[in-house]
Image (cartoon, rainbow, N blue to C red):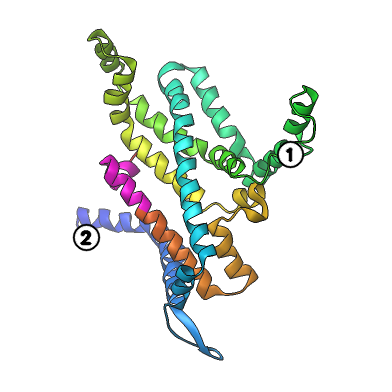
């Protein structure tokens, strides 16, 4: 056995668990869901090819409106997360030094030491009608009666941004750390304004990190079930809730599979559009 063959063999052995995991838990289940989404019941225990599940989505305004609403709020949550994460990432990467940088990164990570359920229930305690914020507003005289802050679109956005912030900060920090400070100093020496330096030097350099963070955050928001359901209540109208209802409540796996693939199609298209608009390549972005 030659040396190159020997290396390929050991590389295959090392990659085998990951490839088996990818095949068994990702590819095969998606193939099965695709088959289910293209079937309709024709008789007792009999199924045939049909696009009825997708026609149902198009014909039912509730499904279509929920689909658009989920996409819109997910994009908005991604933008808000970027706007909040960029200054924090800049401070961590370029201002903080030594132990301060480590402490700040730990503080970003700290909320994720507990489950998403616990974090979301914490927001319920803060924002409910008898919660901490409502009581505080009444105690300082800013409200005469209990204030209900739950079950609003703004509340859902707060929960989504909070749950996704770390996944935007980390790729941004990685991108900004590689930015040479001398470039910024030279730009200032040549009379460049802060706005121009950010627009022409900082943002282009951080573009792969911005794209990577936005992709991850958008995917997390789009596929989130717990946060919109708990913070938005019965009227949250999130598409993952429709998928859950089809699979678990109505036992309509064919319709649920179709909805799942529609959500996958939506995320793929929006990510592709985002990469095209920013001029980034997916391979380069994923290396960030």
> Which residue is identified by label 2?
1
Quadrant of image for the N terminus: bottom left
- Give the number of the mark in front: 2 or 1: 1
Where is residue 263 drawn, in percent x and y? 45, 60
**Residue at image location 77% in from the left, 23% down from the top:** 141
Is 151 left, or right, of 105 in this rendering?
Answer: right
Depth order, front residue of 95/125: 125
Where is residue 218 drawn, in percent x and y? 45, 46
Q: Residues within 10 Å of mark 1 (few under 14, many from 20)?
A: few
**Residue at image location 59% in from the left, 63% down from the top:** 244
> Which residue is identified by label 1?
125
* Snapshot quadrant of residue 247: bottom right
Where is residue 8 drawn, in percent x and y? 26, 56
Where is residue 287 drawn, in percent x and y? 33, 41
The answer to which of marks 2 and 1 sits earlier in the sequence is 2
Is 86 inside the magenta-drawn segment? no
Depth order, front residue of 79/183: 79
User: What separation in Å lies between label 2 and label 1 (alpha carbons)?
Assistant: 65 Å
Tags 2 and 1 in contact by the CB under 8 Å rule? no
Determine the secondary structure under disc 2.
Answer: loop
Determine the secondary structure under disc 1.
Answer: helix
Q: Which labelled disc corresponds to residue 228?
A: none
Marker count (numbered): 2
Residue that extends furthest to the front in the rendered view of this protein: 144
In the rendered image, is residue 277 in sight?
Answer: yes
Q: Is residue 232 above or below residue 203?
A: below
**Residue at image location 42% in from the left, 23% down from the top:** 90
The magenta-colored residue range is 270-286
Q: Is residue 261 above or below residue 88?
A: below
């Amino acid at each position: 056995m030659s040396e190159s063959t020997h290396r390929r063999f050991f590389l295959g052995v090392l990659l085998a668990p990951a490839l088996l995991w990818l095949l068994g838990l990702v590819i095969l289940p998606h193939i099965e869901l695709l088959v289910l989404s293209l079937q309709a019941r024709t008789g007792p225990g009999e199924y045939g090819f049909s696009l009825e599940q997708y026609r149902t989505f198009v014909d039912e305004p509730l499904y279509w409106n929920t689909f658009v609403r989920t996409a819109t709020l997910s994009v908005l949550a991604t933008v808000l997360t970027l706007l909040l994460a960029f200054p924090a990432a800049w401070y961590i990467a370029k201002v903080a030094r030594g132990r301060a940088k480590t402490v700040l990164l730990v503080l970003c990570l700290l909320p994720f030491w507990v489950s998403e359920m616990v974090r979301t229930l914490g927001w319920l305690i803060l924002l409910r009608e008898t919660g901490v914020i409502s009581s505080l507003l009444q105690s300082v005289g800013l409200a005469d009666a209990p204030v209900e802050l739950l079950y609003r679109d703004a509340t859902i956005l707060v929960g989504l941004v909070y749950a996704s912030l770390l996944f935007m900060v980390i790729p941004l920090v990685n991108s900004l750390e590689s930015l040479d400070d001398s470039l910024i100093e030279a730009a200032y020496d040549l009379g460049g304004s802060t706005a121009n330096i950010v627009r022409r030097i900082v943002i282009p350099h951080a573009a792969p990190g911005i794209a990577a963070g936005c992709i991850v955050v958008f995917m997390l928001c789009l596929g989130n079930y717990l946060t919109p359901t708990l913070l938005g209540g019965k009227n949250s109208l999130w598409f993952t809730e429709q998928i859950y209802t089809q699979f678990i409540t109505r036992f309509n796996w064919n319709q649920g599979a179709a909805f799942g693939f529609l959500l996958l199609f939506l995320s793929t298209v929006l990510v592709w559009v985002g990469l095209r608009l920013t001029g980034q390549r997916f391979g380069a972005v994923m290396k960030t």
